[in-house]
Image (spheres, rainbow, N blue to C red):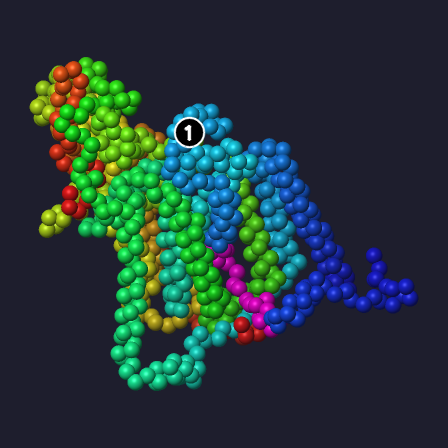
Amino acid sequence: MGRRTDDEGRPRRRRRTLSGRLVRGIDDRLGAASFTSKVLGKVFPDHFSFLFGEVVLYSFIVLVATGVYLSLFFDPSSHKVLYHGSYVPLQGQSMSAAYASAVDLSFDVRAGLLFRQVHHWAALVFMAAIVAHVARLFFTGAFRKPRDLNWYLGSTLLLLGLANGFAGYSLLDDLLSGTGLRIMWSVILSIPFVGPSLAFFAFGGAFPGEQIISRLFIVHVLIVPAAIAAIIGAHLAIVWRQKHTQFRGPRATEDNVVGSRLWPAYAARSIALLFGVATVLVLLGAFIQINPIWLYGPYDPTAATTAAQPDWYMGWLEGALRLMPPGHAVIFGVTIPNLFFPAVLLPGVSFVLLYAWPVIERRITKDRDCHNLLDRPRDRPWRTGLGAGVFTFYTVLFVAGGNDVLASELGLSVNAMVIALRVILIVLPVLVGLGVWKWCRDLRRADPPPDPETDAALERSDVPVTVGDDTS
Amino acid sequence: MSTDRERTQSSSSIEYFVAGCFGAAIAGAAGFAASYWMDLGIRYEGLSAAVALGALTLGLGVWANTTLERVDVVQEREPLGSTHDERRDVIEGFERGERRMQRRRLLAGMAGSSLVAAALAALFPLRSLGPRPDHELSRTAWRRGTRLVDDDGKPIRPDDLEVGTALTVYPEGVTDPAQRAAAQTVLIDLGAAATAASTRPDWAVDHCIAFSRVCTHAGCPVGVYQPETRQLMCPCHQSLFDVTDGAKPVFGPASRPLPHLPLGVDDDGNLVARGDFGEPVGPGFWNR
């Protein structure tokens, strides 16, 4: 096709682009042009491991979108109803309105089952992405000053994610989730002095009570999601202000950012990732069944469950409960039940250490400088070894959460499995930690980190460089 | 000029591909609408939605990585901390408010205390969330003479059970879910030989023995009776209790025996309780 010309053969005036019309329209009203041009030119470094945090954000968006739909049909009530829906095996049974409406969502609300399963899968991916993100930050030293602030916000996000995941699957009042709530009641009860009162306050009386479902609902759909959204917002604002970290590279130094501009390349890639996350979650939700509550039946405090497994992110706590040796403490006449140690003390200590890590490491290394360049894991053998050991510890606990299933798969007795796992829980983290420490030292010897001299030499070489202005 | 033309051509073929992806996304969206409208079920709904979202992913991804800028851009970082003057200005800004006051410490102290008092007062309504634990944790609905009934409310005679079987029983006439949950009891017929060998033969009535069915670890129903070992197992965390040895825990995290329900037989030959459990049932708490 030739050039566009008008009737007299003169080149036609260049068309105004869509962007042009939009920007003029908005700037006439808000005067946002200078701010927006800084935003569009903001540079973000590229590395696959920087995407975990984005996956967290996009899973959260999917969680909100699907959750809003579900909330329009779910009835968070403990009132007993007789089921008359289309799932034949449950017809005529007495159950809570919460469970009945969740079964209705699965069978009698068109597309309801898709939304339910995508919502559940999104929660699993959300938590997995947070854990992957935390691991990336830990092993690369991204939590060091000035980003210790964002480490605290992220740790809170992990805590809130755990709480909301538990609240969410406890709402449905099926046999599995009700058993989980029964255990949670016992965990609260085990806290010295305040436990019994706290448990009665939370449940509005003795277990099961009639309050807990509607209370968990408001926690699950309003209080915690609002807190998560606020924290994600603050987290991103701080990333924006502090600029993203980067790995050392030919041009990447402590004092610059090397990568793509926000617009168009980074934004297009990131929006593609949003749709990519949504695609995967929809495929998981459509084709891999999750939490088929109609098979479990309604909760009945006298019904026993076998081979029950919580969602994966609660697996480490389940495993800790199972591996805890018997016994309880009595101190000055105050009983501290067995349950307190794996279910209250362990997660308490875990989160305190998680929050305190930037401070602890600062004490050890005496390093109080700001860092914008990331460590390669091999460059800090002791930190990487420690992290690998800790990660192994929680993985063994996670495996122990399925010890009965695993024992029957392996043809072992549950008792032998528990004893073996108790030993592995202590021994394996130490071995893995030492092994990784040694491995890092070997790697570093073979491939030492570049020294500043080489950096300067590289910077002097004439690699084509586009320099964006730094005003944002 | 030839390189320019090549670039134009390759970029326009990529643009056609991207446009094709967006077209596929429209088709996927239409497919979702159709599968919803025709009620084709979760597979078709999910597949069509995934086609729409996946085509958008592919289109945007290809667009971003081939036609949009690919060169690395370098941007300088400014130090985060502000200059000395800027910090001083902020401090002075706050001090403007402070200087006007004569008794700064008193005012600041009283203002802080009043906020703390208001926050503490706001905690009081939380008391309405639930009653304080009264006797619910230490007592159950079993009383002297209460008949044992099964799930359907039928009374039980000692010879209703076969040797080596277990039955879940409740106090007769109790319907409240919380009371039933706390009072659930497992009744086991040990048989003559096992009763004689048991360390607590006096607890059994006609070879029948009863224990609380609420696990002393985390409160799950101790739902599995293994007659060959005469052990009760809690399926939640695999604690084992030896029925012939006072239901003491023999494996797993449970640390206390299952409380024992004293049994008797009434004039009609039905099993009755001779009182409540001797101690609180279920998981431990600090002052049990």
Q: Residue at x 8, y 23 (%)?
A: B202
Residue B205 appearing in the image:
yes
Residue A425 is at least partly visible in this image: no
Report x, y in % for residue B112.
29, 71
Q: Residue at x 83, y 57 (%)?
A: A1
The chain under label 1 reads: A
Classed neighbour count for the residue bearing mark 1: other residues with Cα under 10 Å, few (<14), some (14–19), many (≥20): some
Q: Which residues are magenta?
A: A33-54
Task: Please give the name of the residue rendered at 54% of the width and 75% of the height, measured from the top-left corner.
Answer: A471
Decide which of A419, A441 is in the foreground and name it: A419
**Residue A400 in which image quadrant:** top left
Q: Is residue A11 left or right of residue A471?
A: right
Q: Quadrant of residue B269?
A: top left
Residue type, numbered disc 1 = Leu
Is residue A48 found inside the magenta-colored segment of the image?
A: yes
Q: How many marks?
A: 1
What residue does disc 1 label? A82
- Image point 32% across, 37% down: which residue? A179
In the rendered image, the residue lying farthest to the right is A8
Q: Taking B51 as reference, is A22 above or below it?
A: below
User: Helix, strand, or loop for circle 1?
Assistant: strand
Compared to residue A439, the image places residue B154 above or below, namely above
Whether residue A49 appears in magenta in the rendering, the answer is: yes
Residue A125 in the figure: left or right of residue A329: right
Q: Nearer the viewer, residue A47 or A202?
A: A202
